[in-house]
Amino acid sequence: MKVLVLGANGFIGKAFVEKLVCHGVQVRALTRKGLKFFKGSVETIVGDLTSKDFDFNQLLYGCDIVVNCAGETRDDALMHALHVQATANLLDAVTCLCRAGKEIHWVQLSSVGAYGSSRKTRVVTEETPTNPCGTYEVTKTMADTLIMACNESSRFSYTILRPSNVFGRDMTNESLRQLGSIVRKRVFFFVGFSPSIATYIHVDDVVSALYLCVIDPRAKGHIFNVSNDCTLRELIAGIAEALEVPPPRLTLPERPVRIGLAVIARLFKLPVTQKRIDALVRRTRYPTDKIYNVLEFSPKKAVFTTIREIY
């Protein structure tokens, strides 16, 4: 078995390549700037999936499984080319190989953002209709749709994994570190009196789920959500403990906070935004019942204890 990993230098992709190497799996990694790790044990192809002259057939040659961890999270202008067009081009090459007798399994790293806003009080499962908001979420969901529609050959199979907010020691997203800074300064406060939900999952759990999607044939044809939800109070208490400060207890009503923020924001630039308030009142849950029932997988790393890794 040879596994092609796209986005192998990324936060999740790098950890996944490490997992494959530790299990003795042959790996071909595609990166735009060369592989930063595992140089001696991983076949590396330097290239850009969005390049007009990129050779998708050569990229796939000899591989049995495609794991797409590639993603653009910062520049909206680049998202459609990488998430949608590159997926379509690679699927064309995959289809040709399958018609020629090759069996290929595609594992797609997607996002629970496919289901839309998490502000509502609701339970989201794999059966929840998609309703993405934002360029990243929309284009990732479009890629999922292309993959599920690629059924021209019985030799092609897929699994789509949709994690919630992924965290870990090497994460590039600074939002949790910024949250920790607020807790450290003892200026954090809770918003709203209904219990809010923190929808996070450790990168090691995501990597373990990806690995099962690669090696377990029962994963074929499925979409799986993965999250390790806890309450926001548990998350903040874990952050406070890691930073050795008392856990915050102040709670303010949501509506006055939003009104006050809107007024003050007209006069001053504030670190608190309406979007940050949205995160503090999130009440959506992403249960992992399906991936447990199909693959016997459940997250192992509790968010409120492993959150200390990033501080």
Image (spheres, rainbow, N blue to C red):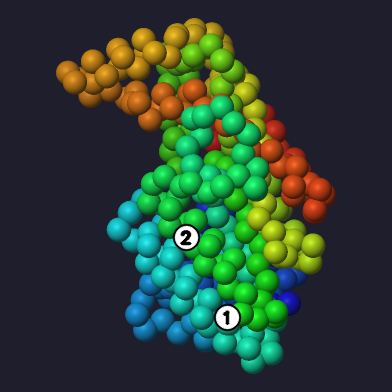
Q: Distance between the residues labelled 2 and 1?
A: 18 Å
Residue type marked 2: Met
Numbered disc 2: secondary structure: helix
User: Toward which corner of the image does residue 25 lie, by quadrant?
Assistant: bottom right
Residue at 47%, 37% in the rendered image = 117
Residue at 45%, 43% in the rendered image = 173
Looking at the image, which residue sits at the far left? 267
- The image shows residue 259 at horizontal and vertical percentages of 31, 14
Residue 310 in view in this figure: yes
User: Toward which corner of the image does residue 144 lie, by quadrant?
Assistant: bottom right
Q: Badge 2 local density, few (<14 within 10 Å), some, or many (20+)?
A: some
Left or right: where 73 falls relative to 199: left
The one of 124 and 234 positioned closer to us in this rendering: 124
Q: Which residue matches tag 2?
A: 142
Q: Which residue matches tag 1?
A: 94
- 144 w.r.t. 171: above or below: below
Report the quarter where the N terminus lies.
Answer: bottom right
Numbered disc 1: secondary structure: helix
- The image shows residue 242 at horizontal and vertical percentages of 59, 24
Residue type marked 1: Val
- The image shows residue 4 at horizontal and vertical percentages of 60, 73
Residue 33 in view in this figure: no
- The image shows residue 251 at horizontal and vertical percentages of 49, 9
Q: Badge 1 local density, few (<14 within 10 Å), some, or many (20+)?
A: many
The one of 137 and 264 positioned closer to us in this rendering: 137
The one of 272 and 257 positioned closer to us in this rendering: 257
- 151 w.r.t. 273: above or below: below
